[in-house]
Amino acid sequence: MAAAQDFRGKWALVTGASSGIGAALARQLAAHRVKLILTARRKDRLENLAAELAAAGSETRILVADLNDPAAPQQIYDATEGAGLAVDILMNNAGLGQYGVFHLSPAEQELSQVRVNCEAVVRLARLFVPRMVERHRGWVLIVASTASFQPIPYISTYAATKVFDRFFALGLAAEVARFGVKVTALCPGPTESEFFDVAHAGVFKRGAQPADDVARQAVAALFRGRRVVIPNVKGRFTAFFVRFFSAGLITRVIEKAARPKSKPSFPDSSRA
């Protein structure tokens, strides 16, 4: 079992660090004296967070990258591990979603969710995990969701990508455990962030949990080597409850509750 001091002085890469859970994860790791590499699309927000953490004594670097670009994971790797920084902690947090009617939504928005939530997660893991295996040391957090436990109409693509994330994390965890590498799937429910406002998914926002609380539990689970963490009671109840009902019944109930009341305008997807 890892102790908190095992993280101290090591480099962590946090994707989607400009807001929400990603920024909260960075703050939690900084509190444990982890050295941070923060990456996201928005340079100004990364600079503000890096300045905040540096003022508190954390060694912090930023990398501006858009994980919708298939070349971005390699660029991140080249600027970190490839440049001699041993990344022992990979926080695969970046993600996006979009609420709305699938057959009316722009195809590019649906495909972007698959690229960022799935493809980028695999690409980054494939680049960084082999080095962790070589060192017999490493921790990987993959942010899934309580949406991964059942199909959810009107965020159909998002929920499906989070199933992929959770199953990928569980399979990878079993593969690399014998090499001293720990993989945790974080499955938060609604979390206080800009995600719901930007994605126009306020219908799913009720009872949102503070991002700092989610991040605190995620980092603690990573310390302990837990393979799945659901950071709120409602989410744990949902994950248990859905085992006893068919997907058809669940989706019929959710579809009626979540059906958009008007035709959506489909702004840019929510992204970190």
Image: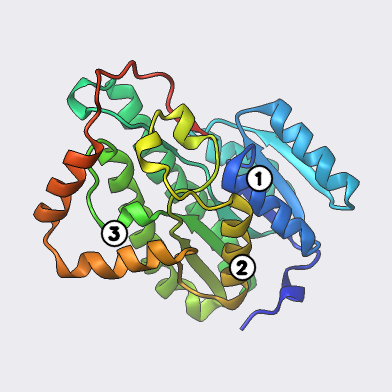
Q: Amino acid at mark 3?
A: Phe
**Pick the front one: 125 or 259:** 259
Q: Is residue 83 left or right of residue 133?
A: right
| Residue 126, image x, y percentages | 48, 54
Give the labeled residue for mark 1.
23
Q: Is residue 241 left or right of residue 39?
A: left
Residues at marks 1 and 2, CA–CA distance in whole angstroms: 21 Å
Mark closer to the chain start, 1 or 2: 1
Disc 1 secondary structure class = helix
Q: Amino acid at mark 2?
A: Gly
User: Residue at image x 77%, y 42%?
Assistant: 61
* Residue 134 seen in the figure: no
User: Residue at image x 69%, y 51%?
Assistant: 26
Query: On screen, 240 above or below 200?
Result: below
Residues at marks 2 and 3, CA–CA distance in whole angstroms: 27 Å
Give the labeled residue for mark 3.
149
Disc 2 secondary structure class = strand
Q: Quadrant of the C terminus?
A: top right
**Pick the front one: 215 or 1:** 215
Q: Which mark is residue 138?
A: 2
User: Residue at image x 50%, y 67%?
Assistant: 183
